[in-house]
Image: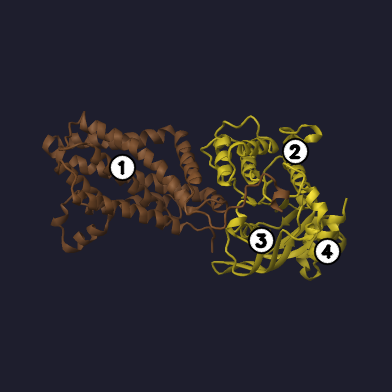
Chain colours: A brown, B yellow
């Protein structure tokens, strides 16, 4: 009867829709990128801020040895922080404007939405990391023992992890104001505990244990190992596995906290 | 006729792509309501928002949901489109329970605030929502062209929606609801803040859509819009004061206009006209 009433109405979806639809994921990623394209200032900031911070770090340390020691960790952390906040705000905005409710009333899977976001912000993260790495390795004179590829890959994974955690965190924000405050609340404790300030094995047992369960610790750990070894090691693989697991868990958690219906 | 002028091609113009009248005449199923509620209760954080509602919405009609702000209109609409959980009772839409995944492409919903991406262009918005509704390729392009014409947004395709006027923005929200040619259209205060000419054009379009087989539920807190509906649900404090065609309500209350009728009903709720839904649907069917 739907055919007679509305001939152009889309065919009723199959009884059991696939968990993720590639077409809808892709459409969502395109939409998010189109939104960014209309906001050149945001793109400029996302691409430039990590690099500007690295340049600042170079002059603050003003010592090639120290820079070589610390730069890789920061290359892992800056994109993570920026992606966290961008993702948290973007989804909070989607809730506040009602577009999320509209989408939840439409045939869009929750994972389609989150995967679309992950792909769009993942692509932005690639550009962001490319810029910061090129500037660090050429102009700032940071050296890596082996190829720069592992560092680039891990930095992008860190950024995607930040994005996934931001998407998840935004579920607990009732306003954009709260979403902004999640940055210091969720990210700064991790930044203090991840080994950036004090080496993790110098912390008291409680803090060291806390550090072990926080995702950013593994991001920094992986960058430290990459900057210390010319070849890929099993320990790096383990770090990458933990980063990927946290990312997947945050995305699934994000999907679980998205509600189609209000109670 | 400014609204439909965008895509009107003389008598050829049809707001809906085909003539479902055929189907309506072929069967008596038109009497089968599009939505049916029995003892529907919705409670939100301890407050009763919808208080034991039993009603049905007839196919191919414009049903008006009239009542003051805060009376539960939006909650009722959100329940129909499946984004509000039901506390007690039953609600079926197009033969499925409200919120069923298979309804998501068949029910169109426009919220009070436009709920579109203000940082995207009109076409980018429609393209994304159309894709989500399952439209692809030529069908998607056609649906976009059709809705832009229907809502007189021609010429604004490439502009970022955030730069639109309030009235234009409201129509973008409606365009998204119309994109998938849904069988049931749930429109929450679609004419608020629009200029009278535009409002008139929108109501003309609502009736055209209903004539071609769609069912519309349109909410409003402005009583002068009530007379434009085929059937009315008068709502106050989570309950229905009346549920009948405008003529019946006027006849039974003896009021001069619908605003007066609402006031009398609010003062004496027990005298509410309650046309049996089935009967009402058949009556409307019999009309020219």
Foreground label between 4 and 3: 4
Question: Which of the 4 quarters of the picture holds residue B101?
Answer: bottom right
Q: Is residue B69 left or right of residue A78?
A: right
Label 2 crowd bin: few (<14), some (14–19), many (20+), radius 10 Å: few
Question: Which of the 4 quarters of the picture holds residue A227?
Answer: top left
Q: Which mark is residue B213?
A: none
The spot of residue A45 in percent (x, y) is 36, 35
Rounded to the nearest angstrom, the CA distance separating label 4 from label 2 is 34 Å
Q: Look at the numbered disc 4 and give the secondary structure of its residue.
A: helix
Q: Contact, CB < 8 Å: mark 3 with mark 2? A: no
Q: Is residue A37 left or right of residue B231?
A: left
Question: Dot 2 falls on which chain?
Answer: B
Q: Which mark is residue A156?
A: 1
Question: Do marks 4 and 1 share a subunit?
Answer: no
Residue position for label 4: B279
Sequence order check, earlier mark of 4 and 3: 3
Residue position for label 2: B197
The answer to whether residue B178 of the structure is visible from this angle is yes
Vertical relation: A11 (above or below) A137? below
Question: Dot 4 falls on which chain?
Answer: B
Label 3 crowd bin: few (<14), some (14–19), many (20+), radius 10 Å: many
Position of the C terminus of chain A by quadrant: bottom right
């Amino acid at each position: 009867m739907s055919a007679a009433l509305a001939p152009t109405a889309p065919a009723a979806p199959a009884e059991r829709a696939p968990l993720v639809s590639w077409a809808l994921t892709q459409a969502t990623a395109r939409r998010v990128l189109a939104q960014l394209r209309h906001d050149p200032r945001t793109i400029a900031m996302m691409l430039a801020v990590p690099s500007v911070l690295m340049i600042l770090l170079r002059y603050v340390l003003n010592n090639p040895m120290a820079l070589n020691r610390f730069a890789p960790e920061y290359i892992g952390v800056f994109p993570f922080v920026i992606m966290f906040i961008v993702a948290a705000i973007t989804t909070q905005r989607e809730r506040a404007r009602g577009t999320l409710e509209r989408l939840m009333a439409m045939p869009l899977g929750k994972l389609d939405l989150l995967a679309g976001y992950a792909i769009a912000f993942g692509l932005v993260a690639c550009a962001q990391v490319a810029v910061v790495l090129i500037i660090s390795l050429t102009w700032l004179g940071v050296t890596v023992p082996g190829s720069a590829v592992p560092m680039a890959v891990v930095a992008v994974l860190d950024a995607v992890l930040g994005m996934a955690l931001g998407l998840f965190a935004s579920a607990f924000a009732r306003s954009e104001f709260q979403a902004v405050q999640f940055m210091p609340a969720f990210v700064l404790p991790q930044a203090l505990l991840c080994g950036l300030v004090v080496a993790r094995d110098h912390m008291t047992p409680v803090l060291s244990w806390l550090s072990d369960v926080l995702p950013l610790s593994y991001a920094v750990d992986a960058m430290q190992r990459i900057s210390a070894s010319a070849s890929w090691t099993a320990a790096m693989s383990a770090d990458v596995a933990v980063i990927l697991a946290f990312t997947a868990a945050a995305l699934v958690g994000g999907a679980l906290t998205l509600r189609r219906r209000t109670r | 006729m400014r609204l439909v002028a965008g895509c009107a091609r003389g008598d050829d113009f049809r707001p809906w792509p085909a003539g479902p009248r055929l189907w309506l005449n072929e069967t008596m199923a038109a009497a089968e309501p599009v939505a049916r509620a029995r003892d529907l209760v919705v409670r939100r954080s301890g407050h009763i928002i919808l208080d034991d509602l039993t009603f049905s919405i007839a196919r191919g009609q414009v049903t008006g949901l009239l009542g003051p702000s805060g009376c539960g209109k939006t909650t009722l609409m959100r329940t129909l489109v499946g984004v509000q959980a039901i506390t007690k009772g039953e609600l079926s839409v197009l033969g499925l329970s409200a919120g069923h995944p298979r309804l998501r492409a068949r029910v169109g919903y426009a919220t009070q605030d436009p709920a579109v991406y203000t940082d995207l262009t009109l076409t980018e918005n429609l393209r994304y929502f159309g894709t989500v509704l399952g439209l692809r390729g030529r069908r998607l392009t056609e649906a976009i062209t059709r809705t832009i014409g229907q809502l007189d947004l021609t010429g604004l395709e490439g502009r970022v929606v955030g730069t639109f006027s309030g009235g234009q923005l409201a129509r973008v929200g409606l365009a998204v609801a119309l994109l998938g040619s849904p069988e049931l259209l749930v429109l929450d205060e679609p004419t608020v803040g629009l200029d009278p000419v535009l409002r008139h054009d929108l109501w003309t379009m609502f009736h055209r859509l209903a004539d071609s087989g769609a069912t519309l539920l349109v909410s409003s807190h402005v009583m002068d819009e009530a007379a434009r509906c085929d059937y009315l649900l008068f709502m106050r404090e989570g309950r229905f004061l009346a549920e009948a065609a405008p003529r019946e309500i006027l006849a039974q209350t003896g009021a001069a206009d619908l605003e007066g009728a609402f006031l009398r009903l609010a003062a004496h709720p027990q005298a509410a006209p309650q046309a049996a839904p089935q009967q009402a649907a058949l009556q409307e069917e019999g009309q020219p």
